[in-house]
């Protein structure tokens, strides 16, 4: 079928475009690359052509927002969350219920979705973040699984496994963002805003404090960093960003069901951060793109993709714990093809 | 919601005890690896799945007698555990906790992929170890398989206790768990002990899978839920404490079975709710002496 051939071309084009985008980014200063990113995002749909590829690019953008938030938590504050899909679900369900069932404006619903997922993160974060390492991982996992079971069982509110459909598109005045192309630009705007925010945070006093917590929580604490407060703030921020992504998800697909917010997806978000590289803003796009395209492949035909997926994950963690992007840059640098820069030790 | 009568209650207790014995085995597997390395092995559930699937293939496809099928499954998964340690854990021994968590998650995705590739995505049936005539006790009925499960788990626990308390190897493993460097100084080959703990943990997981699959069937992704519940049991009993792991497993099995009797939709939430409550209120679990880490 020609559609399949075309979509493979599209996927290649997406990958090439993303790689080019990432390659530019490291050579420039923060606000420079934001402009470059905006320009690249603006022309990307014309390179992609088909609606299918543009829709996929929008989906990648949505996951990029989740990965960005999780990257702040994992890469900068050094805390794990294996329940991030639950926050995406809270955002998505808030938007879906308020628009499709209550009839509220999509924009207001989105604000509610972000607020509610941030609030949930605050409420569960206070007790959960007292845990460390494996225990925090399992605690967040337990939270995620329970939220997912609630989405299935609380049928009066969520319609259970049947899901919620008829979610209206976002619109301004009479203009509805109801095609893949139109919605892509909404997502692209949101991604660039989130990236700008994330990079501002990282380069601020808060960012330094977060990195100190990652380096050594005890050392950070003794030098006067309120470690508990910073960890909670980052956790709330990552939850709210996941909620924003969830609201966008609801308006992109206009249909949601509990299966989209389960344990497997929480793991996928962690994998996005790892492949893209912990403590790397550009890595979020790279990781979200790689994982979404691989997952798309799995859904199509390749039955043995999880084998490769798992293998690559283990190999990256053993040989390139900072992710493919920085690991690749290291190789280039060793070959003398890229500028060197100061960096902390790999582990 | 309807209140169960005495016979129903007994039935719930019996199935809870059976399920709980299986959780206890899985929890013990977590405990062994955690004590030897400080790692929580997210691929533990895949050990269980491989045990079940190998046993099913040996017994149904190859037509081997049941004891041999179970033996091959246990030995196979023990090898798998040792291989996992050698290939994925040892090269990253000095890595951070996040790195190690993701390595075992990656390994579990990899193993699930292999399982789906080899055995396909359908649930595979397995015959009972002996007979399918239920035995009636006080209005409740027990399958012979229930007795097999509880019996095999009891024997395994006894064997593990003997191994840990009475043998040289067991004492060496426990010494490594207390202080790896000190153990190495007195001449214990610590890295071999770590590998051995992965192999033992694989044996426990494989056996758990092989004995539960006549009741639950075998499927490539069965390890996700079973592994997580085994972990919840280990947390409930107190991570690192073998007696706690067994107690936690049995308690969790009974709680789940009773809870499902009242409200079946929330059956799977019970384990995680219990785990969260224990993690937040008493991270050291029922019997654990060590605090949160």
Image (cartoon, coloured by chain):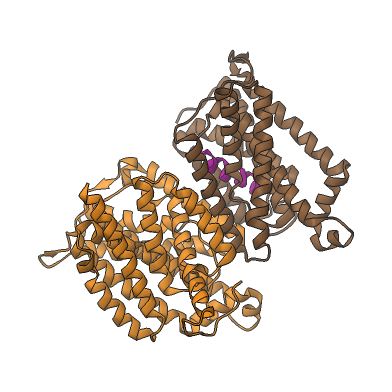
Chain colours: A orange, B brown
* Figure check: B29 above or below A110: above
Outermost residue, left direction? A174
Say left or right for B250 vs A152.
Answer: right
Q: Is residue B24 visible?
A: no
Range drawn in magenta: B222-239
Residue A81 on image: x %, y %: 51, 60
Q: Residue at x 54, y 22 (%)?
A: B5
Q: Quick one: quadrant of the C terminus of chain A?
A: bottom right
**Residue A106 is inside the magenta segment:** no
Q: Quadrant of residue B39?
A: bottom right
- Magenta stretch: dominant SS? helix
Q: Nearer the viewer, residue B1 or A308?
A: A308
Residue B114 percent location from the top left of the image = 52, 43
Q: Position of residue B280 (x, y in %)?
A: 59, 56
Give the percent coordinates (x, y) of residue B151: 71, 26
Figure check: A304 above or below A283: above
């Amino acid at each position: 079928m020609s559609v399949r051939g075309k979509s493979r071309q599209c996927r290649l084009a997406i990958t090439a475009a993303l790689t080019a985008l990432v390659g530019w980014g490291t050579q420039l200063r923060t606000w420079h690359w934001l402009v470059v990113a905006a320009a690249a995002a603006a022309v990307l749909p014309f390179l992609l052509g088909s609606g299918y590829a543009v829709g996929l690019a929008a989906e990648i953008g949505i996951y990029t927002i989740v990965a960005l938030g999780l990257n702040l938590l994992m890469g900068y504050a050094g805390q794990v969350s294996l329940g991030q899909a639950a926050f995406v679900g809270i955002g998505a369900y808030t938007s879906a219920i308020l628009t499709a069932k209550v009839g509220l404006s999509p924009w207001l619903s989105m604000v509610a979705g972000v607020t509610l997922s941030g609030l949930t993160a605050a409420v569960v974060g206070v007790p959960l973040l007292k845990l460390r390492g494996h225990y925090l991982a399992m605690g967040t996992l337990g939270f995620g699984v329970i939220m997912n079971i609630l989405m299935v069982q609380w049928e009066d509110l969520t319609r259970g496994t049947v899901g919620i459909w008829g979610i209206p598109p976002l619109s301004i005045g009479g203009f509805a963002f109801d095609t893949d192309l139109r919605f892509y630009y909404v997502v692209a705007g949101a991604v660039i805003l989130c990236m700008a925010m994330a990079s501002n945070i990282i380069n601020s006093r808060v960012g330094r404090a977060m990195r100190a917590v990652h380096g050594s929580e005890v050392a950070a604490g003794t030098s006067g960093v309120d470690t508990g407060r910073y960890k909670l703030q980052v956790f709330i921020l990552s939850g709210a960003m996941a909620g924003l992504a969830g609201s966008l998800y609801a308006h992109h697909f206009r249909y949601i069901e509990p299966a989209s917010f389960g344990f497997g997806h929480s793991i996928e978000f962690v994998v996005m951060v790892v492949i893209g590289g912990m403590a790397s803003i550009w890595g979020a796009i790279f990781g979200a793109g790689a994982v979404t395209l691989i997952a798309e492949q799995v859904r199509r035909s390749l039955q043995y993709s999880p084998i490769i997926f798992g293998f690559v994950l283990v190999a990256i963690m053993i040989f390139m714990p900072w992710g493919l992007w920085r690991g690749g840059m290291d190789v280039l640098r060793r070959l003398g093809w890229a500028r060197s820069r100061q960096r902390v030790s790999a582990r | 919601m309807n209140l169960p009568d005495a016979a129903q209650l007994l039935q719930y207790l019996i199935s809870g005890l059976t399920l709980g014995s299986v959780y206890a085995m899985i929890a013990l597997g977590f405990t062994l690896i955690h004590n030897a390395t400080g790692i929580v092995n997210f691929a533990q559930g895949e050990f269980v799945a491989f045990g079940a699937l190998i046993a099913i293939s040996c017994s149904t496809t190859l037509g081997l007698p049941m004891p041999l099928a179970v033996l091959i499954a246990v030995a196979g998964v023990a090898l798998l555990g040792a291989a996992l340690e050698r290939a994925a854990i040892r090269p990253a021994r000095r890595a951070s906790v996040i790195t190690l968590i993701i390595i075992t998650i990656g390994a579990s995705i990899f193993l699930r992929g292999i399982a789906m590739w080899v055995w396909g995505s359908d649930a595979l049936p397995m015959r009972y170890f002996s007979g399918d005539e239920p035995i009636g006790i006080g209005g409740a009925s027990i399958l012979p398989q229930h007795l097999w499960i509880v019996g095999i788990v009891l024997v395994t626990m006894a064997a593990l206790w003997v191994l840990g308390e009475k043998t040289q190897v067991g004492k060496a493993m426990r010494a490594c768990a207390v202080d790896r460097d000190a153990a190495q100084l007195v001449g214990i080959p610590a890295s071999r002990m770590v590998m051995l703990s992965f192999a033992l943990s694989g044996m426990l997981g494989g056996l758990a899978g092989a004995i539960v699959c006549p009741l639950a069937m075998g499927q490539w992704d069965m390890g996700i839920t079973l592994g997580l519940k085994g972990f919840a049991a280990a947390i409930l009993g107190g991570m690192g404490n073998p007696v706690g792991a067994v107690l936690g497993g049995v308690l969790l099995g009974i709680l789940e079975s009773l809870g499902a009797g009242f409200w079946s939709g929330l059956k799977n939430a019970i384990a995680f709710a219990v785990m969260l409550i224990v993690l937040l209120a008493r991270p050291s679990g029922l019997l654990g002496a060590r605090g949160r880490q």
